[in-house]
Amino acid sequence: MQLRLQRRLAADLLGVGENRVRFDPERLEDVEDAITREDVRALIAEGVIYTKPVTGQTRLRAKEKRMRKGGKYSTLTRKERWAMRVRAQRRYLKRLRDNGVIDRSTYRRLYLQAKAGRFKSVADIRNLLTEMRKLGKR
């Protein structure tokens, strides 16, 4: 029993996709006999042909949709990466200054260098200070 024509006509009349069109299993003979739009319209009015409800979107799918996919800077922009890196460096420098490992002038100089993007990471600052003999080996 092929109901392709009826499914297509019903989908068009209901304004939904063909996959959402459902037929009452007990009245399939009536659906099979319906060959015009008016016949299908009558069956829709009777409730023999109806639409399947839309399934909701799970939270996981919604989250996946929100997440950006792709390139190097898709999840974190360059600016966000820079801000996170510089904040960590500033925290480290502040800790060194407060503990008396570096003096105020060294702190200020390194702070400005961190702002300028001189250091890739906190480890980079540590290496520089080790070379300058300001910091003991760790």
Image (cartoon, rainbow, N blue to C red):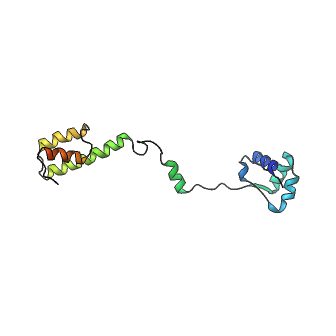
* Residue 35 visible from this viewpoint: yes
Q: Residue at x 52, y 56 (%)?
A: 60
Q: Percent from the top left, x then y, of residue 138?
A: 17, 54
Q: Is residue 107 left or right of residue 40?
A: left
Which part of the image, by quadrant, shows the N terminus? bottom right
Tell me where residue 71 sits by quadrant.
top left
- Does residue 90 show up? no
**Residue 50 in the image: x percent, y percent?**
76, 55
Please give left or right for residue 54 compared with residue 84 in the image: right
Residue 49 shown left or right of residue 52 in the figure: right
Q: Residue at x 35, y 40 (%)?
A: 79
Closer to the camera in the image, 132 or 53: 132
Height in image: 121 above or below 57?
Answer: above
Residue 104 to residue 44: above or below: above
Of all residues, the one furthest to the right in this rendering is 33
Measuring from the top left, give residue 61's x and y in whole percent.
54, 53
